Amino acid sequence: MISSDDRDQFLEDTDQYRRELIAHCYKMVGSLHEAEDIVQETLLRAWRKQESFEGRSSMRTWLYRIATNQCLTVLGSRQRRVLPSGLLGPGQDPDVPMAPTSEDRLWLDPLPESVLVPAGGEDPADVVAARSSLRLALVASLQHLAPRQRAVLILRESLGYPASEVAEMLEMSVPAVRSALQRARARIGDIAPATDEVVEPDSPEARAILNRYMDAFERADVEAMNELLRSDAKLEFVPSEVWFQGKVTCVGHLRGRVMTEPGLYRMLPTIANGQPAAAAYYRPTTDDDFAAFAIAVLTVDRQHIRALTVFAEPELVTRFGFPRTQPA
């Protein structure tokens, strides 16, 4: 019989891996909520099977094995999660509204920085490394891979497990692992965006761009936004299938449909997927309080916004640690 001391020791042994397991499962399934559920189920299964854990691998590897196979089970029963740009080509008419689609789609979620960095802090080098594998465009690209190819690519290249261990974890042969990795690399090479210089979200350049973005939105300063966007900038709005590419079209849409009057939005800075982001609040009139509206994730270089992805889900704002409302 397992004693309370055994249980406490188990919780202590496994809790140190919880955050990285959530990040891993998020890359696999594209949803923070699902990732947290999978990790909870992983720890429950590990607790029930701990007597069968014979120490042939590390505790960390054992947990990754359980978690990855749980992800594969979930992915086998549903469609993949996407961003609008993964469905159709960009819209050409800036006057078309980015209205929620009537299709029953699963959308990619943004990931709060709190998943990567505990309240007590973490080694900055480890944080930078974790962020690099969780950039929004990369996670979106991973969702286009077949689930088992996705698992092999993440385990081999993000986590550095040798092919022999991956084969054991996924109950595959080593040649099958190598073949899946080769196919995954080729597919990612076709669909992943070009890798520009990565700008850390807490760098002075990224903070300056985020501050200018928030100020422009709050003041409905479309010209300031025009200066911020790169010529090939992309604008996406989840859960709409409509998206735009190119500064002229993006600014035209913002001018006519979104940034129509000063004082309608309030923005608070945050970090999502290792990128600068803002918690957005909206009020229909200047007599109302601000209500949680969206998490906006910015992809930036050192001078401009390359992509703006707006996740219009009020619950996400609270998941990022912000209140549901803001006083006027």
Image (cartoon, rainbow, N blue to C red):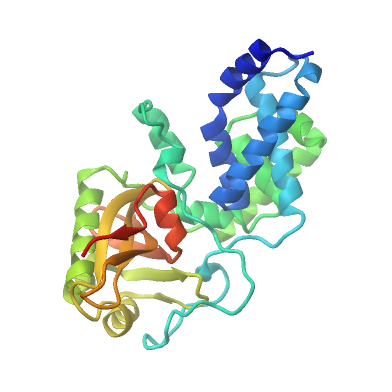
| Number of numbered discs on residues | 0
Q: Is any atom of residue 163 visible in this view?
A: no
Give the vertical position of 135 relative to 261 (above or below). above
In percent of width and height, residue 253 lies at 33, 81
Residue at the image position 64 percent from the left and 37 percent from the top: 40
Q: Is residue 88 above or below residue 170?
A: below
Could one spot residue 203 in this view of the protein? yes
Residue 2, relative to residue 134: is it above or below? Answer: above
Using residue 155 as the reference point, say whether residue 292 is left or right of it: left
Which residue shows up at 33% across the image and 77% down it?
Answer: 250
Percent of width and height locating residue 82: 57, 63
Q: Position of residue 66 (x, y in %)?
A: 72, 33
Quadrant in the picture for residue 86? bottom right
Q: Quadrant of the C terminus?
A: bottom left
Q: Nearer the viewer, residue 174 or 134?
A: 134
Q: Residue at x 79, y 17 (%)?
A: 51
Closer to the camera, 119 or 288?
Answer: 288
Q: In this rendering, would 143 be left or right of 256? A: right
Q: Residue at x 59, y 18 (%)?
A: 13
The quadrant of the rendering that contains the N terminus is top right
List x then y, in percent, for residue 134: 48, 46
